[in-house]
Amino acid sequence: MLITTRLGRTVEVNEDYTVDQKWDHFTQEEHDRWDRLYARQCNLLPGRACDEFMEGLKLLKLSDSGIPNFEELSERLKAATGWTVVAVPDLVPDEVFFDHLANRRFPAGNFIRSEAQLDYLQEPDVFHDVFGHVPLLANPVFADYMEAYGKGGQRAMGRGVLKNLARLYWYTVEFGLINTPKGMRIYGAGILSSKAESIFCLEDASPNRIHFDLMRLMQTDYRIDDFQQTYWVIDSFQELLEATYQDFGPLYDALEASNTVYSPAAVLESDKVHNKGTQAYANAGGRLAKAS
């Protein structure tokens, strides 16, 4: 079937919204752009990214040798945890996304950002999806969490609670932090693929850093256009996995009954706070406001 992407391209997709990666359709300039992004993040992330991410980079042989071939990458990833990477032209519908995750398929954008978008891109491209997300899928516990999230999404489709579930994905998979014996580290893909946020999330006094609490997190709005005002911190991937293996039915009942939504900057007395942020960055208008 034919679809029109958010970037205005008309693309023929399969029923599950996948496409043939056609690795040779990428230009040398696009491969070079991957190489520069890869080198920049690899210089920045040691001491900031969690060990599991760095180990995944090495195991999967991601490198600054151009955009990865998904078929070759999937062979290495499947041998580790049973996951594969499939190419999609754009964001896919919720039910398709959940089905892919529930069946250990990670959908990755089949395009790379333009030169003008090198430092900021709202749409997830191949660098965000493959560099940011895929290395942690080589970790068995995180791989199980992602499958559990997909299955949880399928169960949630009929409950009208996808907004709450989206907050879980956003604040963990995309923008999560983890405590380690070496200090707080990054595991969220939205941070790992961003030079500026890799520094901001750990080193700036502005954002809150609050310990993971499932219901509290699912009641909290988030920023889609700038750095986060709050980052949620786990102690281990096992903690995250166990939180998603519970029956979400009573949790959804409680969310519906309370109908409470907290602002992205909220700090409650009941929160376990690692750092109460000044919110100076957000109060000053943020990066995008300053650039406009």
Image (cartoon, helix red, strand yellow):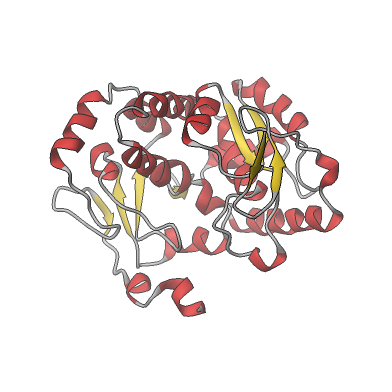
Q: How many marks?
A: 0
Residue 124 x/y as whole percent: 58, 49
Residue at 67% from the left image edge and 57% from the top image edge: 113
Is residue 286 at all visible to an observer of this figure? Answer: yes
Q: Does 232 sit left or right of 254 as displayed?
A: right
**Quarter of the image containing the N terminus?**
top right
Q: Does 76 sit left or right of 5 as displayed?
A: right
Residue at 34% from the left image edge and 48% from the top image edge: 232
Rendering quarter of residue 149: top left
Q: Does 255 sit left or right of 65 as displayed?
A: left
Is residue 234 at all visible to an observer of this figure? Answer: no
Q: Where 215 falls versus 229 (above or below)? A: above
Q: Where 229 falls versus 19 (above or below)? A: below
Residue 268 x/y as whole percent: 17, 53
Residue 103 x/y as whole percent: 55, 21
Rendering quarter of residue 3: top right
Residue 244 x/y as whole percent: 35, 27
Depth check: 32 or 260 in front? 260
Depth check: 252 or 210 in front? 252
Depth check: 59 or 284 in front? 284
Residue at 66% from the left image edge and 46% from the top image edge: 126
